[in-house]
């Protein structure tokens, strides 16, 4: 896919030097040593179409964020800003303005409704991926804001770090026929059954794939999750399955059940899984 420049030891750089990097042949540039970024330094990256990592930044102003892409369908195709611990509404709105297909903000410790709405105004290319894996909680207001993404294609939202998700926040994540995420990565094993019951109400015309990250949910929780029906795809990363869990999965009412890491299974487990009709 091309060469990557790892320049984490660089702590200062002139706009002219950064412009030279952008004009080179590298498809990836990592500058985690930069802890601040000015508008002048950010501007050359608007012409960079590769993967840009700036995880050393702990704060980003809206004017700097906008300069990264000029706000006119340009800028890095994949942008990593995992050092940011907070994000205001104007900066989130600026980040949504340019042609990025992947935006990683895994360092965020909280997400305001204003910032969520800004990120959801993202009008990027097909296959957008938004990663917010550092969030431990998601308020109903922030969840409602994230749900405003306009449905255009396969778009993925990753919230793997959530320690809990209240039913009200889960309900707020639900989009409508024109808004919402088609794929979600959620640690559903951490959610209570009331929240899982809300997840099963998601219309698969919007949410097409639910990827359960982390540990395999209990059989009790999978029975509840199994009520999600229609054209949905449920993905689990389970290396082993006991009989009770397999029986719960066999009753899943969606279109596709994927067990990505399953190694061996007993005859009883296999028999239980044959109950899945899709």
Image (tube, rainbow, N blue to C red):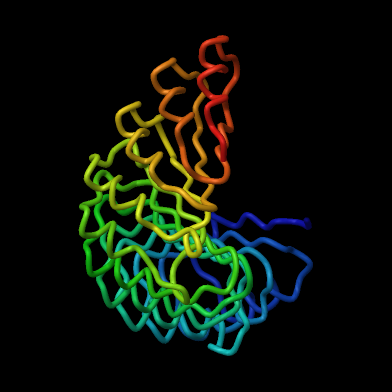
Q: Nearer the viewer, residue 145 or 35?
A: 145
Figure quadrant of residue 247: top left
Q: Position of residue 45 (x, y in %)?
A: 60, 77
Q: Residue at x 63, y 70 (%)?
A: 126
Q: Is residue 55 left or right of residue 13?
A: left
User: Quadrant location of the C terminus?
Assistant: top right
Q: Nearer the viewer, residue 88 or 250?
A: 250
Q: How many marks?
A: 0
State whether residue 38 appears in this view.
Answer: yes
Whether 133 is drawn above or below 65: the answer is above
Q: Nearer the viewer, residue 231 or 68?
A: 231
Q: Residue at x 53, y 80 (%)?
A: 123
Q: Is residue 91 left or right of residue 48?
A: left
Q: Residue at x 24, y 40 (%)?
A: 193
Whether 85 is drawn above or below 92: the answer is above
User: Quadrant location of the N terminus?
Assistant: bottom right
Q: Position of residue 66 (x, y in %)?
A: 48, 84
Q: Nearer the viewer, residue 88 or 124?
A: 124
Whether 24 is drawn above or below 71: the answer is above
Figure quadrant of residue 15: bottom right
Q: Position of residue 239 (x, y in %)?
A: 52, 22
State whether residue 33 appears in this view.
Answer: no
Q: Position of residue 256 (x, y in %)?
A: 57, 42
Q: Residue at x 44, y 54 (%)?
A: 158
Whether 199 is drawn above or below 119: the answer is above
Of all residues, the one furthest to the top in this rendering is: 267
């Amino acid at each position: 896919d091309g060469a990557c420049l790892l320049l984490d030891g660089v702590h200062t750089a002139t706009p002219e030097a950064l412009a030279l990097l952008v004009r080179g042949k590298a498809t990836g540039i990592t500058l985690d040593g930069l802890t601040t970024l000015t508008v002048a330094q950010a501007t050359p990256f608007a012409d960079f179409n590769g993967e840009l990592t700036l995880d050393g930044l702990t704060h980003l102003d809206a004017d700097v964020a906008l300069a990264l892409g000029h706000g006119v369908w340009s800028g890095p195709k994949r942008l990593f800003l995992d050092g940011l611990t907070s994000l205001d509404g104007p900066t989130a709105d600026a980040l949504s303005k340019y042609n990025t297909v992947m935006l990683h903000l895994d360092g965020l410790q909280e997400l305001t409704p204003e910032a969520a709405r800004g990120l959801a105004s993202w009008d990027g290319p097909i296959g957008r991926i938004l990663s917010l894996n550092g969030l431990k909680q998601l308020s109903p207001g922030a969840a409602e804001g994230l749900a405003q993404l306009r449905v255009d294609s396969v778009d993925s939202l990753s919230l793997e770090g959530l320690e809990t998700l209240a039913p009200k926040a889960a309900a707020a994540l639900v989009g409508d026929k024109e808004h919402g995420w088609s794929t979600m990565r959620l640690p559903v094993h951490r959610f209570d059954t009331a929240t899982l019951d809300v997840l099963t109400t998601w219309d698969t015309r919007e949410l097409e794939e639910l990827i359960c990250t982390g540990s395999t949910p209990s059989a009790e929780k999978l029975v509840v999750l199994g009520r999600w029906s229609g054209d949905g795809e449920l993905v689990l990363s389970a290396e082993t399955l006991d009989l009770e869990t397999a029986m719960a999965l066999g009753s899943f009412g969606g279109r596709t059940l994927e067990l990505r890491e399953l190694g061996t299974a007993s005859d009883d487990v296999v028999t239980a899984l044959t109950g899945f009709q899709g």
